[in-house]
Structure formats: C-alpha cells, structure tokens
Amino acid sequence: MSAADRAVATVATVTPEQVHTALGEVYDPCSQSWQRPMSLVDLGLVREVAVDGEGRATVRISLTAPFCMAVPVIMQSVEQKVGAVDGVTGVTVELDGGTLWRPELMTDKGRALLAAARTEDRRMLPLAPVRAAAG
C-alpha cells in the first residue's frame, strides 16, 4: 500500500466519536479558574460533530454566556485537541448562538462533578445560621 493509500485509509477511519472523545479534553477556562475544571462535553456545550470523507472535522459549540470572553481560547483549544486526532486533516469550529446554556444540558458526569465541588465548598466554608434581626 502506498503512502497516499495509507493516508486515505487513515482519513476514512476518523469518526465523529473520536472527535467527540477529543473534545472531552477541552476544558472551559472559566471552570478552570474556579478550580472546577469541566470539559465542553460535560458542560453540554458540544452541539454537533461531523467529519467529512477528507478527514475535515466540523465542531459546533455553544457557550455558557452570550458574551463569553474566553471564546478565542476555547476555539483554539478545540482546534488543537481535535487536530491531534489521527486522520483529522482540518478543523472548523462554529459557534451556536441560538442555544442558550442551561444546567440540563450537562452530562451526568458534569452534574456529578459540580455537585461534588459544591459539597466540598460547603464543607470548607461552613455557614453560620442567619438570625432574624430584633425588632
């Protein structure tokens, strides 16, 4: 088999599932800054993944906030992680401005990670009971 034939065979084996798996390694910068690293997948931000016959991957994502300042960082990270998948020849990242993020979009794993972080916060910062003002 020639090098060109091997390249075509490699490209043909790239699946959306492989790309989706790579997206599990793309973390939302804001969640990292709050010491709760969550992937775009676990946050429910991946709207669509497609791979054409040439190995070009298209990833459509939504954001947790319409005016997210981390968009360039997120897009670059998607390009890097997906571009590293064997057989991927190019990556296009599209933003879905029509899907507003809400907690229901999170994966079960994402909800569990967030719940664990909140439990840890409550343990580390015990709240004193609120007392009614005398009146």
Image (cartoon, rainbow, N blue to C red):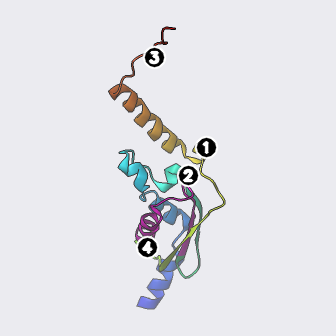
Q: Residues within 10 Å of mark 4 (few under 14, many from 20)?
A: some
Q: Nearer the viewer, mark 3 or mark 1?
A: 3
Residue depth check, mark 3 versus mark 2: number of the one nearer the observer: 3
User: Could you tell me the amino acid type at mark 2?
Assistant: Gly
Magenta segment boundaries in residue numbering: 57-81
Q: Going 44% across and 49% down the picture, which residue do you hit?
A: 38
Q: Which mark is residue 83?
A: 4
Tell me the mark number nearer the camera, choosing from 4 and 2: 2
The local crowd at label 2, few if under 14, some if 14 to 19, many if 20 or more residues have their Cα within 10 Å, is many
Q: Helix, strand or loop at disc 4?
A: helix
- Would you say the residues marked 1 and 2 are in contact, meaning their CB atoms lie under 8 Å apart? yes
Residue type beneath disc 1: Glu
Q: Nearer the viewer, mark 4 or mark 1?
A: 1
How far apart marks 3 and 2 lie (CA) works out to 36 Å
On the image, the x and y values in percent for residue 96 come to 61, 64
Relative to 133, say whether 16 is above or below.
below
**2 horizontally vs 43: left or right:** left
Q: Label 4 vs label 2: CA separation?
A: 21 Å
Image: 109 above or below 85: above
Circle 3 sits in a helix, a strand or a loop, which is it?
loop
- Disc with the residue nearer the chain's start (3 vs 2): 2
Q: Which mark is residue 21?
A: none
Q: Position of residue 81 (x, y in %)?
A: 41, 67
Q: How far is mark 3 from mark 4, CA to CA? A: 52 Å
- State the image quarter where residue 52 is shown: bottom right
